[in-house]
Amino acid sequence: MVISKNMEKLVAGSSTIRKLFEEGIQMAQEVGAENVYDFSLGNPASPVPHEIRDSIENILDNTDGNIVHGYMKNAGYDEVRKAVADSLNRKNGTSYSADDIIMTCGAAGAMNCVFRSLLNAEDEVITFAPFFGEYRSYVANYGGNLVVVPADTKTFQLNLDAIRPLINEKTRCVIINNPNNPSGVIYTEDTLKKLNDILTEAEKEIGHPIYVLADEPYRELVYGDQTVPYIPNIIRNSIFLYSFSKTLSLPGERIGYMAVSKDIDYYDEMISALVVANRCLGYINAPSLFQLVVAQCLDIPANLEFYDRNRKLLYNKLTSLGFEVVHPDGAFYMLIKSPTPEEDDFVAMGKKYHIILVPAKSFGCPGYVRLAYCVSHDMIERSLPAFEKLAAEYYNK
């Protein structure tokens, strides 16, 4: 075998979501794209805001090309980092400076920088099911182990009763994804305060900090009167990770940032390591043009109406057909409880009617499937008869 043993494991566990997405493409070639209902991938279909195009044109027309397309500090342009810090301070009552912001290749790039900075071989990172499956690969990149707290399938809030026994001297981080992918649930302030109490006590016992990674690319995608608590205001040793991929429909541009409060333990060491990690991982810096673009577009709201319309139509239809669905208050995903013990069988039955769903055991939540409703409303409307046929396989017999 030519490739590394570590890569062998990663290839063997390659993304289920991507495989299903590719299967949907193949299915479309066979039966026609209009007859395939692909809910597999969190690829936002909401149009890119016109302000993005305006900003690109303005920057290219009025900024020196060597600046737009050149290197800058590994942490990013100073003026961009200041704009991000000022925006966070306005919205959350924080006191970040430009020095506390590192521009990254999305939230995924930011998370890899944190793990590169913190993890030694066999160190542990805790996350709560259900969780974004790529966390496992990111942790493994640096010789660490992902420890999964089982899902609380009654509330889908953090399973706090189960986390404390999993914390030990090897625990370096806890990942919180809020709003959650794949459930769409928002973790409450009360839940997060209780987690803070648990971690504060655990840090005293094990003798070192446990950093909480607030992974929040869906932060602005919340519905009704729901709000998302700002984790660094609740948990002191936390690092805020953000991506513009979802809010501004820019997943392919790979632009995001991390915000590191000066209140965290070992701030000076951490910020230096994170900046160097941004370089030594090969990113060098976040994409230059889109750093400048997002700095001009920090206050553009997410297209909530687009996603909320999809959310309401699907949730109401699926529950009326008899499916048990976890009510999503944020993001653009929902979990459906499988009518059969093995959700793979349910996924296979969905394919019979050209519906592409993702088994949630890849998110650490067996017995459920994930549906991504960040698709066109027209596709959802066309899919409803297929969902009716799928429901008839299990109900009303």
Image (tube, rainbow, N blue to C red):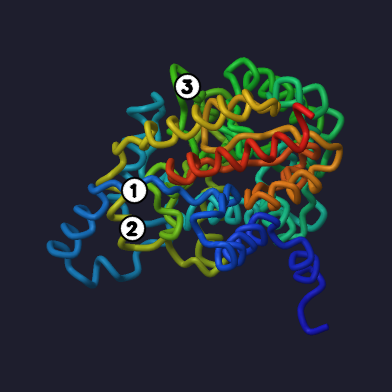
Quadrant (top left, top right, bottom left, bottom right) of the N terminus: bottom right
Q: Is residue 293 left or right of residue 366?
A: left
CA gap, disc 1 and disc 2: 17 Å
Residue depth check, mark 2 versus mark 3: number of the one nearer the observer: 3
* Sequence-earlier tag: 1 or 2: 1
Q: Is tag 1's residue or tag 3's residue first in the polypeptide sequence?
A: 1
Q: Which residue is mark 2?
A: 290
Foreground: disc 1 or disc 3: 1
User: Does residue 57 lie above or below 207 as drawn?
Assistant: below
Query: What residue do we see at 12% from left, 62% from top?
Result: 62
Task: Name the residue rendered at 58%, 39% in the picture.
Answer: 385
Residue at the spot x=43%, y=45% of the render? Answer: 376
At mark 2, the secondary structure is helix
Q: Position of residue 354 (x, y in %)?
A: 63, 52
Measured in 3D between alpha carbons, the distance from the residue under mark 2 to the one under mark 3, in whole angstroms, is 28 Å
Residue at which label 3 appears: 227
Mark 1–mark 3 Cα distance, whole angstroms, equals 24 Å
- Inspect the image, locate mark 3, and give the three-letter code of the amino acid beneath it: Thr
From what the image shows, is residue 271 above or below residue 69? above
Inspect the image, locate mark 1, and give the three-letter code of the amino acid beneath it. Answer: Pro
Label 2 with label 3: CB-CB less than 8 Å:
no
Residue under label 1, please give it. 47
